[in-house]
Amino acid sequence: MAASETSKETILRYAFGNVLSFFILVLIGVLAFSIRLFSVIKYESVIHEFDPYFNYRVTQYLTKNGIYDFWNWFDDRTWYPLGRVIGGTVYPGLTLTAGTIWWLLSSLNIPLSVETVCVFTAPIFSAFASWATYLLTKEVKGAGAGLMAAALLAMVPSYISRSVAGSYDNEAVAIFALIFTFYLYIKTLNTGSLFYATLNAIAYFYMVCSWGGYTFIINLIPMHVLLCIVTVMTSEHFASFLVFIIIHVVALVYYIKGILSPKMFKVAVTFVVSIGVVVCGAVLAVLIALVASSPTKGWSGRSLSLLDPTYASKYIPIIASVSEHQPPTWPSYFMDINVLAFLVPAGIIACFSPLSDASSFVILYIVTSVYFSGVMVRLMLVLAPAACIMSGIALSAAFDVFTRSIKFQLPGATENSERDAGETSSNSVVAQNDVAKTEKNEDAVKERPSKKNRKKEKEKENVEKPSVKSQIKKKLLILPLEASIIAIFLLVLLGAFYVVHCVWAAAEAYSAPSIVLTSHSQDGLHVFDDFREAYAWLSHNTEVDDKVASWWDYGYQTTAMANRTVIVDNNTWNNTHIATVGTAMSSPEKAAWEIFNSLDVKYVLVVFGGLVGYPSDDINKFLWMVRIGGGVFPHIKEPDYLRDGQYRIDSQATPTMLNCLMYKLSYYRFVETDGKAFDRVRRTEIGKKYFKLTHFEEVFTTHHWMVRIYKLKPPKNRIRGRAKKSKSKASSTTGTKRIGTKKKNPWH
Amino acid sequence: MGFRFDLLMFMIVLLSVPVLSNLILSNVDRRIDLTTQAVRITSTLKVENTGSDLVSEVLLAFPDDQAKHLAYLTATNNEGKGKAKSSSVSFPVDVVRPKGMHPSLTFYSVSLPKGLGKGASLTLDVLAVFAHALQPFPERITQPDIQLVVFNETAHYLSPYAVKVQSLTVKLPDARIESFSKIENTKIHGSEVKYGPYENLPPFSYSSIVVHFEANQPFAIAQQLIREIEISHWGNVQVTEHYNLVHGGAQSKGEFSRLDYQARPHVRGASAIRHLVAKLPPRAHSIYYRDEIGNISTSKLWGDPKKTELVIEPRYPMFGGWRTAFTIGYGLPLQDFLFHSEGKRYLNISFGSPINEVVIDTLIVKVVLPEGSADISVSAPFPVKQGQETKFSHLDVVGRPVIVLEKTNVVLEHNQHFQVYYKFSSLSMFGEPLMLISGFFFLFVACIIYMHADLSISKSSPSYLAKLQWDEVQAGVQQVRNIFDRCLTLHDKLEASLRDLSRTGDVQACKASRKAVDGLLKDISKDLKPLLLSLQSSPQAAQILPKCSICKTSNATS
């Protein structure tokens, strides 16, 4: 009687626990989605930054023309005159995902624009990612840790920075794919199920489709497999696989032995072995030759800079020029993962007790991702899920200990201790301090095996004994009531700090779409919408086939928002082409005109922040143009633009600097605004104030002067004087001139 | 000007055309308003029937090149003197092609329902609005230049009837007048040029005049405007207007300098379109102003109970020839625009754009009625091209009927209400919510069925049997674990009592608790027995038995 009652009670309790965790997960999903909506609420539902505009444009093409056209898409509106094969050079995962969502909605007659779908893809996938984190952590350390990790991931600032509404970039879906692939890998490892293995392969494929970061998985999983094989704690699956292979080899050998005479068999063995050795050697030699023959030893520049952090800055300025490829600073760790940084070590220790396949994988994951994040700011994103999982494990273990000690010392509450512990740990406001850490870790050692039992009957036999003993021992580890209460209070405080920081980061730091800027002044909010003003002007008031030259940062936006052909864009696949534009920007007006004219350019767009103090303008990026241009065309020399190694645009600036096209286009008639030509970004008066443009004319400048568009003057104006004298002479001079141009013009 | 010369030729030809009827115009007073880009010509005609027959129509003549820009034409009967508009009756006006007339003239006939008897007279107020009648000259200007436009008209009223007395007033904007044709009886009063009076002119008199003047008001022309009016019986009329705007004035050439424009906006960029004012109906809500790349932040909104005023600025100041495209959307309360009459519902909403200064080349009004509307008819105050299509949105199954009304050359005067009548049952409103509810219901039912149904293909396969056994053992193990838990709590209690004993020396209490615990432990071992038996009987549970013996021993030790 009593037994059946208690069993009913437990079933009820488990059912209740399941329902509770289901609702907690739903709430975590809602949290993950809604914390990313600050950008929509504070600004508007718009695509952010640079790369998302390209993805948006590709998605538009996909939804308009269908998948086959998308696959074969040769884009002639970019990299003029080379063009770009989009279908073959893009990671299609994100685009296909958003395209599918849009297609589903529109087939249900729900009228959402492609833009809306694209804007909200990232928040939706962050909800998925937090659920995937729950599953992964649950496989590693149980449901409590899973819920905690999911809650932490739902609002980790590092991930928010890449997945706010409107940040329609590969990372948005790739992080979900990454975590989910890891989950399926662990699940396959734990169950040995072929079903999960298949799912894992599919998830892996999706990951590869979505992001260049798949190389991380491709290396991490084999590393873990190797680790599992090498270490003693090899799982029975690996053993069985190994045995499986060995058995087959042995069977084959016996079979061959059976059909051949002993003499022949010996010959066959030597033959096979020698052939095998030769083939292996040959393959190895070919591989080494191939790797050695390529200048980068078969690695892409970005990967190389992962192994050698100084590689990019030494050899490839175009990679080094991107701010997200720089190594992070210490504050950026605090900014991006906040208190998780302190919880990770505790989580690692918790994972070591006991070390299972799953927990060793998580340890491997955190170790590698910490290294990668140290090399490139961008890879902080890979670290974030690992940090969340670790901290989730740490926190849930800590709460386990504290709540249990409190429960034990409160009279009459022992029965419900476990349930309460579960509930408390699922609260999102959590953290921990040092005392708690060590205590909990010791405790976790004893705790874990019993949890595992539930899952694995086979293991029970071996593990149950220590488990019971551990439970008996447990009371010896119980902390004093006051200490536990204080520790829980501190943990909650730390968690609250984390939540406040995350909400602040989501609301203030990471929600700016960067195409619309705002500033607060005495008379309220001021909006700087200059970029879209310029793009809208280009799109409505220039010919459809006009070519617009600008630094590559604005390439994606120009093609997506203004629908005009650009020379270079953010897909920096052709260094020479970018260097050509860089050279033109660093050349004097006439030489620049010749380069641009040879590229059929009709408009030149520069971004200028000097009037309103917008710091990431072209003058501040100019040294990179010089460097990248000079890397290909040696007549551009960086020292020519520097005075005593200093980059300056004031009266001390070098004449080369003051006469280059970028300077002129940025500061044309700037002096007339305030009479002094005071640049608010560089905080100085500019060096050359009064000058005229001979080969370019201003056709548009936005309200705050942030974008200035110039038109190339038609060539006949230049030879007017000579044409009168003699036409034949004029033509011959232009002819020689053209030859001269060819020599000088690096593009030919 | 070749143009003028042609007209003179044409006038001579016209003079040979015979007189049409016995009507004469005893007095013609014309006022031409050139202060906006739409040219408004108000003519007051005093028509007299000098013949003996009843005349039921009056013809109005326009040269073809003017007629093709004619956007709006009404003729009203002006009975009382002064401006007692309430007494005016408007007459139907139609295009006619009377025989024997010159082919380059377009005639409109004003039908007089009562007819005009012998010797009777009638005063007609004719309002004609032309959309593109002002020609910029010079056609291309630079940023600091002012915009000059040319207007061609005839000083003598072009009419198939003889005109006794006539006069013409041309009202120009308060700005420089570059030149105007000086013919006899020309006077200038401030910004008004007066021609006439001229007396006793034969039919088809024509005397070309040209006025060349500064006009810096923006020439905002919507090449296409699509207004979509969507009715939701849940209480909202959603209006979405897609504008394709161009500055139709003198083309801008050469540089655009923001510096000059910002320093002296009214000199350097006098003719630029800086902002437009949309006068929305009162209680308009959820107003947005955006284009294909997002929200346009330069707009202001004022609202009071009588009107809502939205001041919109394009993303950039628009100079001559510059284009832009944007969308305005707003919601209106349903009860203000939807009414019932004779078992039908009808929508009563204005036809034209809420932006008054815009001249629209092609206006397409789409009225999206709720799904399931039937018996649709339209009543418009002026002729429009009608069509019908279907739109699918928000979970529609059969689609919503859409009435498409198209009109070219639309000006301010077209801002009149039109009506769309249709039948719609209120019950069909609930179709879509019910569909959603049932959809979710079936989803949940499917989930429940899936959770409870046994979907294994073979009931006798070893893996299936193994799974059953597995579940069974799992349950048993779970129960055993529960017993462990209870056992452990008893341990804890016992321990606590022992601790108390060591502290207080209260042997009795300790003994009592010991007794209680013993009793409970007995119960537990009782509970354990059947479980152990069942587990022993299960072949898969053989490995778990040692664990149970541990439990037993632990019981014993306590």
Image (tube, coloured by chain):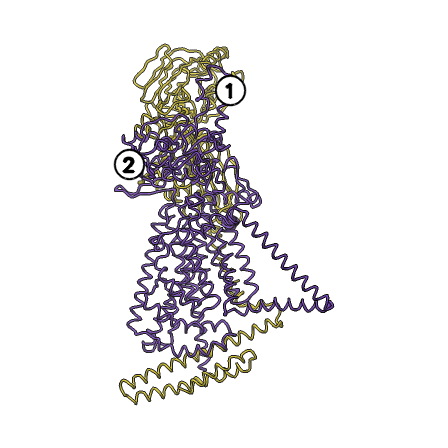
Whether A706 is drawn above or below A157: the answer is above
Residue nearer the viewer, B280 or B446: B446
For mark 1, what is the residue?
A: A732
Whether B524 is drawn above or below B344: the answer is below
Residue A54 pos. (x, y %): 47, 43
Figure chain in yellow:
B
Residue at the far left: name it. Answer: A522
Residue nearer the viewer, A644 or A684: A644
Residue B411 pos. (x, y %): 41, 29
Whether B488 is drawn above or below B156: the answer is below
- Chain A rendering hue: purple
The quadrant where residue A690 appears:
top left
Dot 2 and dot 1 within a common chain = yes
Residue A94 pos. (x, y %): 49, 50
- Residue B75 visible in rendering: no
The local secondary structure at tag 1 comes to helix
Q: What type is the residue that disc 1 sits on?
A: Ser
For mark 2, what is the residue?
A: A684
- Residue A18 visible in rendering: yes
* Mark 1 chain: A
Q: How far apart are marks 2 and 1 (CA)?
A: 47 Å
